[in-house]
Amino acid sequence: MDQQQLVEQFGPREAMEYDVVIVGGGPAGLATAIRLKQLAQEKGGDVNVCVLEKGSEPGAHILSGAIMDPRALTELIPNWKELGAPLNQPVTEDKFLFLNESGSKGTPPALLPECFHNHGNYIVSLSNFVRWMGQQAEALGVEIFPGFPAAEVLYNEDGSVKGVATGNMGISKEGEPTENFQLGMELHAKYTIFAEGARGHLGKQIIAKYKLDAGKDPQSYGIGLKELWEIDPAKHKPGLVVHTAGWPLDPATYGGSFLYHMEDNKVAVGFVVGLDYTNPWLSPFEEFQRFKTHPEIRAYFEGGKRIGYGARAITAGGLLSLPKTVFPGGALVGCDAGYLNASRIKGSHAAIKTGMLAAEAAYDALQGGRQHDELTAYPAAFESSWLHKELLQAKNFKQWFKKGRTTATLMTGIEQWLLPKLGIRNPPWTLHREKPDHVYLKPAAECEKIVYPKPDGKLTFDRLSSVFISNTNHEENQPAHLTLKDANVPVNINWEKYAGPESRYCPAGVYEFVQNDDGKERLQINAQNCVHCKTCDIKDPTQNIVWVTPEGGGGPNYVGM
């Protein structure tokens, strides 16, 4: 049964009214909620705010490097230290290494571009930080509904956003209501703020409906893979930050790694691959596993234990790919819009800041008796903010990599090291991207096949054991949330032309090509494994895969990540 039939038979859906509904309980969504409540306390006029979070609790689906620049947090919650925010490990040392197969070259500290200076920042677990943010929001009177994914945007007759509806519960694999069936709920708001993170599935619909990306560069993404390790205390250097570029990726592929020494002998290690790569044989997951075998890197992990794994797409297009962020009835904040600074590999400070700016615009609008119109004060405030200046400096970062690693390294040095010394923060040239990530794949026959080594189970691992420690689970009897526009495309195009790249770009083993009895291939979708990274939605060469929300509470449960 489709949505309309379900509503006709079991409806109407219950509706709840709020001033502001926020979709997504990450740093951007919670910062929006907190700032709205702060303003109501400071200036009067209560604002009722609700946050929908598809994970089982705030922080469950949050994954990031993460080094946090506390600038925005200090603006939002000046006394965060006293309130126990989990920013416990200041950065003590920055290293940047260029790797070749057997050795490395370090960048002298004096030549390190500004974007890699982390003095004054903290190494954090973003999932733990978001849990703390959730507690701060609730203490101010914000209603948070975990386990409730927003599945549909609701519109008023004049085309403005009215709110969202949550997903139905208890639908079988066949799409029929079971004995546990519950119709989703409608949440109506004067303003709806979308804070779903990179490639938010409703944000994507909003951008398309209102053509918010008209005249902008296509958004560009990376996939970030991450593991959490407990290592030998003798090898642990609290506060050490190591970034690398080079091996195992070829010079034409954008990417690199991070290695952050947290507190308690824990190390976060991760790898980012730009999703504009060309070789369909490439597997970001396998590149990450291979990276750990480098002599400079493996030394840290030998004798240690892997305790967490996760993956998430990252917006990397920066300022030139930023869509218009307001539309009638709402706004996009954080990575749903794409505010991440790829040169600094940081997005949380931008998420918090944009959440605050959107909240200030929404509060003023509500006090003026407005609703369902455009919050034009929000993009105007962004353009005069420190965040805009920061993103202006990094506007060309990802684009240079299309010209190869050597050129990109040189130009990043000029834009982020030399020009600032001359007092120039906005590079006097602009490079544009013309093509979205999914069009870059070449046919498999034109590319060198990559043969990856087998995992050893100590330093390198397979996907299934990795997904297991991400605590990922979905209620099995529900329709697959990885939907295909045309069921014939995976075999007829993706398999035939590109050798089935979905089986390699997915970091969780969701997509598998299996042989039928007649010897023909078919695509099997193991939706149970999905860690909600959104890579398939971005990289599928035919844009045939559409990620939609599963039942609430499904997906990973990240702890300490």
Image (tube, rainbow, N blue to C red):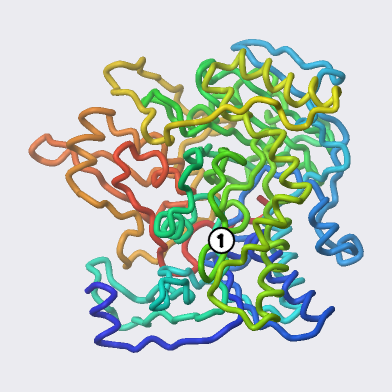
Between 29 and 456, the one nearer to me in the picture: 29
Q: Position of residue 53 (x, y in %)?
A: 56, 68
The answer to whether any part of residue 56 appears in the image is no
**Please, is residue 513 above or below residue 49 in the view?**
above
Residue sitting at x 45%, y 61%: 202
Secondary element at tag 1: strand
Quarter of the figure with the N terminus: bottom left
User: Dot 1 surroundings within 10 Å: few (below 14), some, or many (20 or more)?
Assistant: many
**Please, is residue 323 above or below residue 521 in the view?**
below
Residue 190, located in which quarter of the rendered image?
bottom right
The answer to whether any part of residue 517 appears in the image is yes
Q: Position of residue 466 (x, y in %)?
A: 51, 43
In the visual, does 41 lie left or right of 33? right
Between 323 and 352, the one nearer to me in the picture: 323
Residue 512, located in which quarter of the rendered image?
top left
Q: Position of residue 31 (x, y in %)?
A: 71, 64
Residue sitting at x 66%, y 61%: 378
Q: Residue type at mark 1: give it.
A: Val
Residue 302, located in which quarter of the rendered image?
top right
Residue behind mark 1: 326
**Please, is residue 17 above or below residue 216 in the view?**
below
Q: Position of residue 470 (x, y in %)?
A: 54, 51
Residue sitting at x 80%, y 84%: 44
Q: Count the numbered circles shown.
A: 1
Q: Residue furthest left?
A: 518
